[in-house]
Image (spheres, rainbow, N blue to C red):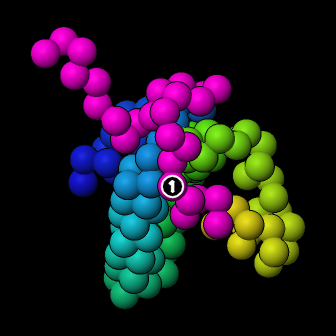
């Protein structure tokens, strides 16, 4: 649950890097929460269909931010996310980028989020 909350705390942060764990845990929690909200709204009443829509709107910016930071982590510009607008192949290309390992060491977007600094010890 911590990676999900960490992304929400960085609500509209589009700079820096996000590791695979941060991105995929946020993605997993979003899927689970969306499914629960959609199923709950369907079973309780059709008048509650606005609740999943509100949730989707609330997590749009954090999702965009963590996706851009994930691309930064692989050494790519956040603008590469626009490839997902190309039907089928664009989404597969972006999925490939998201699955890739972090670029080792520092890159143009900041330090590697997967390494911890022990300089103070």
**Residue lying farthest to the left in this orientation:** 121
Instruction: Looking at the picture, tell me which residue is in the foreground, 62 or 54.
Output: 62
Q: Residue furthest top?
A: 120
Decide: few, some or many residues near mark 1? Use Cα within 10 Å; few <14, some 14-19, many ≥20: few
Q: Quadrant of the N terminus?
A: bottom left
Asked whether residue 83 appears in the rendered view, the answer is yes
The C terminus lies in quadrant: top left
* Closer to us: 4 or 102: 102
Which residue is at the far right? 86
Residue, disc 1:
101
Residue, x 64% and y 26% (percent of image)? 108
The magenta stretch spans residue 104 = yes
What is the tally of numbered marks visible in this picture?
A: 1
The percent position of residue 25, horizontal first and vertical second, equals 37, 59
Query: From which residue to which does the magenta span run?
Result: 96-121
- Given residues 6 and 77, the one toward you in this image is 77
Residue 78 percent coordinates (x, y): 71, 41
Q: Position of residue 54 (x, y in %)?
A: 51, 56
* In this view, 58 is above or below 16: below
Asked whether residue 45 appears in the rendered view, the answer is: no
Going 49% across and 33% down the picture, which residue do you hit? 105
Residue 69: name its quadrant: top right
């Amino acid at each position: 649950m911590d990676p999900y909350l960490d992304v929400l705390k960085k609500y509209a942060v589009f700079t820096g890097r996000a590791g695979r764990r941060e991105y995929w845990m946020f993605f997993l929690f979003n899927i689970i929460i969306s499914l629960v909200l959609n199923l709950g709204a369907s079973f309780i009443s059709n008048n509650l269909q606005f609740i999943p829509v509100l949730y989707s709107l609330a997590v749009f910016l954090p999702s965009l931010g963590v996706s851009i930071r994930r691309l930064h982590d692989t050494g790519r510009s956040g603008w590469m996310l626009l490839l997902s607008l190309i039907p089928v192949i664009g989404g597969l290309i972006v999925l490939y980028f998201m699955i890739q390992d972090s670029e080792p060491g520092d890159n143009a977007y900041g330090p590697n989020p997967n390494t911890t600094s022990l300089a103070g010890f």
